[in-house]
Image: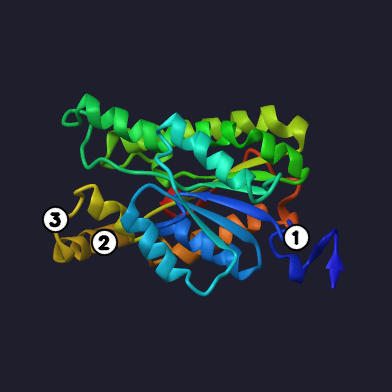
């Protein structure tokens, strides 16, 4: 069945496309990669650490169309090597997902300058610079889009000062890029989750152990009117929609996937 160029076999709206997922070896990025791989796309999963790449290879072992590339997106030489590696497999990419990110556990008064720089580099500069580096490959697609994984903290500040500010800046980057890149037919949108239990919070020291992590999650639950926390598949479904032809007239959107937290 076909309607407005969308078919059930083309759920991503990009045929058998080539996709790059920065931060695609863990958390939300890994689930996005899995969804697009299952739909038959070639997915380049980009991760910073050996551990992340090993785990992603194990998780996605059943997909022959998965490619794994190690890259520190805050280092220009690494990003240049990343683009070269992708260019060896394809002369165009149809979707770039910027899911690379980190968090600090501190508020403004406690956070160091070094922590501020680290979070801003990973959450904002990495996404902006990766988008710039892949621009020529995105242009060649003729139907491409960029999707940034932001956060509801961009609108409702959370405990981490730099995280909230970096995500607010990423939202503005999304809007500005959407305006500038529309002339090339490139759509740019953002998905803004609320609390989705991943290793992100633990790695930032938000919680000290599994018991305190569960206690922290319980304390977050009342903030979500729909009565539950999010899952990686909730976020991946929103990304899949924004990448699809059903979203072909959507650009510059900030899509909250937050269980109602923004209206609570």
Q: Which quadrant of the rendered structure holds the N terminus?
A: bottom right
CA gap, disc 3 to disc 2? Answer: 13 Å
Where residue 185 appears, as percent x and y from the top left, is 76, 38
Q: Residues within 10 Å of mark 2 (few under 14, many from 20)?
A: some
Q: Nearer the viewer, residue 35 or 140?
A: 140
Q: Residues within 10 Å of mark 1 (few under 14, many from 20)?
A: some
User: What is the basis of the colouring in this image?
Assistant: rainbow
The residue lying at 34 percent from left, 50 percent from top is 49
According to the picture, the residue beneath numbered tag 1 turns out to be: 15
Q: Nearer the viewer, residue 242 or 67?
A: 67
Mark 3 residue element: loop
Count the labels in the image.
3
The residue lying at 49 percent from left, 36 percent from top is 79
Residue 212, quarter of the rendered image:
bottom left
According to the picture, the residue beneath numbered tag 2 turns out to be: 217
Marks 3 and 2 close (CB-CB < 8 Å): no
Residue 166 vs residue 108: left or right?
right
Marks 3 and 1 close (CB-CB < 8 Å): no
Q: Residues within 10 Å of mark 3 (few under 14, many from 20)?
A: few
CA gap, disc 3 to disc 1? Answer: 44 Å
According to the picture, the residue beneath numbered tag 3 turns out to be: 208
* Circle 3 or circle 1, nearest the eye: 1
């Amino acid at each position: 069945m076909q309607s407005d160029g969308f078919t059930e076999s083309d759920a991503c709206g990009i045929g058998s496309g080539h996709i790059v997922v920065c931060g695609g070896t863990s958390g939300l990025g890994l689930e996005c990669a899995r969804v697009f791989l299952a739909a038959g796309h070639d997915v380049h999963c980009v991760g910073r650490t050996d551990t992340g790449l090993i785990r992603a290879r194990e998780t996605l072992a059943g997909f022959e169309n998965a490619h794994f590339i190690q890259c520190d997106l805050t280092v220009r030489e690494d990003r240049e090597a990343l683009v070269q590696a992708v260019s060896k497999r394809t002369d165009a990419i149809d979707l770039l997902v910027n899911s690379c990110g980190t968090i600090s556990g501190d508020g403004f008064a406690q956070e160091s300058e070094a922590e501020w720089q680290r979070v801003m580099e990973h959450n904002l500069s990495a996404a902006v610079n990766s988008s710039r580096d892949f621009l020529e490959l995105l242009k060649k697609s003729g139907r491409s889009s960029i999707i940034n994984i932001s956060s509801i903290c961009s609108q409702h500040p959370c405990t981490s000062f730099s995280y909230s500010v970096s995500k607010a800046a990423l939202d503005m980057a999304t809007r500005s890029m959407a305006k500038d890149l529309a002339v090339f037919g490139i759509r740019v949108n953002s998905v803004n989750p609320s609390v989705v239990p991943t290793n992100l919070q633990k790695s930032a020291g938000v919680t000290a152990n599994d018991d305190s992590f569960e206690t922290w999650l319980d304390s977050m639950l009342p903030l979500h009117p729909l009565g539950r926390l999010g899952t990686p598949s909730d976020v991946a479904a929103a990304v899949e929609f924004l990448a699809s032809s059903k979203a072909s007239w959507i650009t510059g959107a900030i899509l909250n996937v937050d269980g109602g937290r923004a209206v609570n």
